[in-house]
Amino acid sequence: MRFDPQAFAASLPESYRRNFDAAAVIAHAQIARAREGAAASVGTFPSTRAGTALCVVADDRPGLLATISAALVLAELDVIEAEAYTRREPGRSGEAIDVFWVRPDPVARRGKSFDEAQMAVLRSTLVGLLEGRVERRLEPGARPLSTPGTTETIVRFIEGDDGSFTTLEVETGDRSGLLLALSQALFNQRVQIVGSQVKTNGTRVFDRFSIVELDGSPISSARRLEIQVAVLTAVDPLIGHETVEDAAEALV
């Protein structure tokens, strides 16, 4: 693959070009070039945002964000922010350029820096998951995920200019493994994430997912409640014991 950062940036959405400077674009392009047909390529890039900035490049496919999120959890990394983009070039299938700002997890490890050994673990875990050689399972005795409670959670669809409901917003309390839980819930609902933005502000997380059905069609109004309840259940499993009508009270 010829190294051309400008062509690389041009193959991505305008929002990508707005959000990253030349140094980050060059680093992302180098990570993409290094993949050379492998299941995934992972590397760091310069950023002024909090945490270690990671870029993951892989073939775009349903469930990819959930798989990457699982690799991050297994590598004991917590997501502070995340953004997902799809790179498109004529004659080629879509390539995901997903970026994450992470910190060590659990809290007791927050003072440690992200090193090459941890990068190697993350890279091998992700490739193993994508190739089916690693099980997506937490080790026995792992620290249980806290649940923020449905009263602190907002799940809503935003209507687009064309009347479709393809943007899902989730606001909730921060907890370890939250992105994995949300992305897995969406995958289980057989929807595809075509773009995402995750931001942590103190103890609150603000997630936005651009989603479509697996065939690329917009999310219908009939599907909204089903997807919202699934996401709310992923945030707080206790709601799984309630009725759909009760769960709907937490949705807007």
Image (cartoon, rainbow, N blue to C red):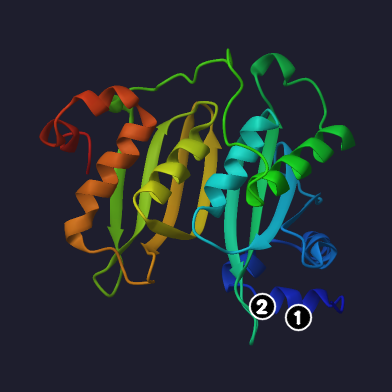
Residue 197: percent from left, percent from top = 52, 51
**Residue 181 shown left or right of residue 13 in the figure:** left
Residue 161: percent from left, percent from top = 29, 72
Where, by quadrant of the figure, is residue 24 drawn? Answer: bottom right
The numbered mark at residue 7 is: 1
Badge 2: few (under 14), some or many (20 or more) residues near its Cα, within 10 Å? some
Indicate the quadrant containing the C terminus: top left, top right, bottom left or bottom right.
top left
Residue 134: percent from left, percent from top = 66, 39
Q: Eyeballing the image, is 184 above or below 157?
A: above
Q: Eyeballing the image, is 184 above or below 213?
A: above
Q: Nearer the viewer, residue 147 or 202?
A: 147
- According to the image, label 2 marks what residue? 11
Residue 216: percent from left, percent from top = 39, 71
Whether residues under marks 2 and 1 lie with C-beta atoms below 8 angstroms apart, the answer is yes
SS label for mark 2: loop
Q: Nearer the viewer, residue 137 or 56?
A: 137
Inspect the image, locate mark 1, and give the three-letter code of the amino acid beneath it. Ala
Q: Residue visible at 56% across and 15% down?
A: 143
Q: Residue visible at 64% across and 51% down?
A: 130
Q: Nearer the viewer, residue 75 or 154?
A: 75
Inspect the image, locate mark 2, and give the three-letter code of the amino acid beneath it. Ser
SS label for mark 1: helix
Q: How many marks?
A: 2
